[in-house]
Structures are given as C-alpha cells and as structure tokens.
Image (spheres, grey):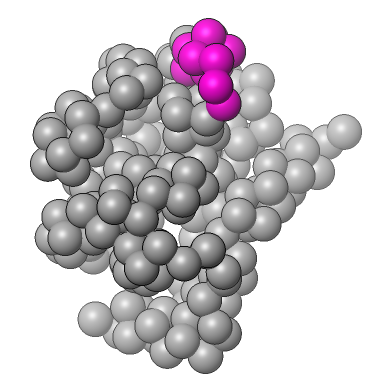
Amino acid sequence: MSDRSAFEDFAAKWRARWPEWAIAEVFAPAAQRDVAAAWFALLQEFADAAWGGSDPAPGLAKLAWWQEELRGWAKGAHRHPLGSVLRPRPAPWGAMADAMPALRYRELPRDPTAALAVLEPLGEGCAGIEAVLFDASSSATGAVMAMLAGAAVDAGGASTAAALRARWTGGPAVAIPARLRDQIVRRRLEAAATGAAWQPAKRWGTLWGSWRAARN
C-alpha cells in the first residue's frame, strides 16, 4: 500500500468520527486540507491511546511508540503514514515528543481546569506545531480541548462535557483550520452537555458555524 493510500485510510477513520469536517473543511485553504486532516487524525490517535479501552497497557505502549516516531520526524524519517503528510513540515516534532508524558495520566482530574493544567505542556506543543502547519498562531488549549471533548462524547459524559464547555475560553486562534475545529468542538460539547446521545450536527448549522469561524 502506498503512503498516500495508507494516509487516506487513517484520515477516513478520523473523518468517520468527526463527519462535521467534511462540511467545515471547504472553508479551509485547499493547500491545508490534507495537512489539517492528518494533524487532527494524529491527535485522535493520541487520545485513543491515552484514554481508550479498559486496559491501559496497550495505550501506554502506543504512546511510547508515538514518542519515538515524532523524534524520527524531527530527524527526517517516518514510519507511520500520517508522517508522509506531516513530517516534511519543519514543525517542532521533537518538542511535541518531549511533551507526550502528559498523556500518561490515565485518570485525569475531574476538574477541567486541573485536567488542562496537567495537559498544558502538550497544549503548548500542539500550538507550536499548528503555527507551522497552518502558518498562523493557534490556541494552546484548542487541540487539547478537542481531544478531551472527543473522549467525553465517546464516553457519554454529560457532566464532563458541560464542565469542559464552561471552561472553554475560546482563546485566540488565527489559523483557519484551528478555528474551524474549535467551533465544531464547542458545538459537540454543547450537545453532549444536555445528556442526549451524540448525533452529527445538522448540515446547515455546521455550514453556518464554519462560515462564521472562517470569517472571524
């Protein structure tokens, strides 16, 4: 299988879990769409390894593998298909690898402020990478909030979603792909906070929200 085909497989897995992006991405610069999908899929891989499944051991092994993979990207090599899209960008992959131990906390504090504090090094690493990938500054909390929101929605945690939504500061995100992601995350948290089973946002609501996010 070619790197391109393998990348599309991983991106498709992420897109299936975040179907809103199929609408939102039309507002992102065409040259950044593959990069955005690869980056967001990578963050999903991290979240799944950190908090998915009942046995923490496989996830910890995956996080250790990813840490070494990112160090390889910093040196110009890659093994994972997502690296075929992301690794050529001169982002601080080594710094991201250094921040990954923050994901080893299987049980994060219930208080969102405390949880975000634990993950702050990871957030800073994500912001540094997004600044390079999208050629514009990004919020240090946006990527981490997306990871936490996905985990909360998957687990059906209404109270967690409500607390995260209350903690969301909407910090400045200049990069368009980051702004598009952030508005999707906010809408998911708002829906999950009601306790209702998650359903994809309605097409017109996503379209309108994405248009506004791209313009702001």
Q: Position of residue 71 (x, y in %)?
A: 43, 15
Q: Is residue 145 left or right of residue 13?
A: left
The quarter of the rendered structure image containing the N terminus is top right
Rendered residue at 65%/20% (across/down): 79
Rendered residue at 22%/36% (across/down): 110
**Quadrant in the rendering for residue 53:** top right
Q: Is residue 209 above or below residue 126?
A: below
Q: Is residue 11 above or below residue 115?
A: below
Q: Is residue 87 left or right of residue 116?
A: right
Rendered residue at 55%/15% (across/down): 55
Q: Is residue 47 above or below residue 9?
A: above
Q: Is residue 17 above or below residue 24?
A: above
Residue 9 falls inside the magenta stretch: no
Q: Is residue 73 shown to the viewer in this render?
A: no
Q: Position of residue 75 (x, y in %)?
A: 46, 16
Q: Is residue 167 left or right of residue 13?
A: left
Q: Is residue 45 left or right of residue 3?
A: left
The residue lying toward the viewer, choosing from 79 and 209, is 209
Q: Position of residue 54 (x, y in %)?
A: 55, 22
**Quadrant in the rendering for residue 216:** bottom left
Secondary structure, magenta segment, majority class: helix
Magenta span of residues: 53-63
Q: Position of residue 21 (x, y in %)?
A: 54, 67
**Quadrant in the rendering for residue 187:** bottom left
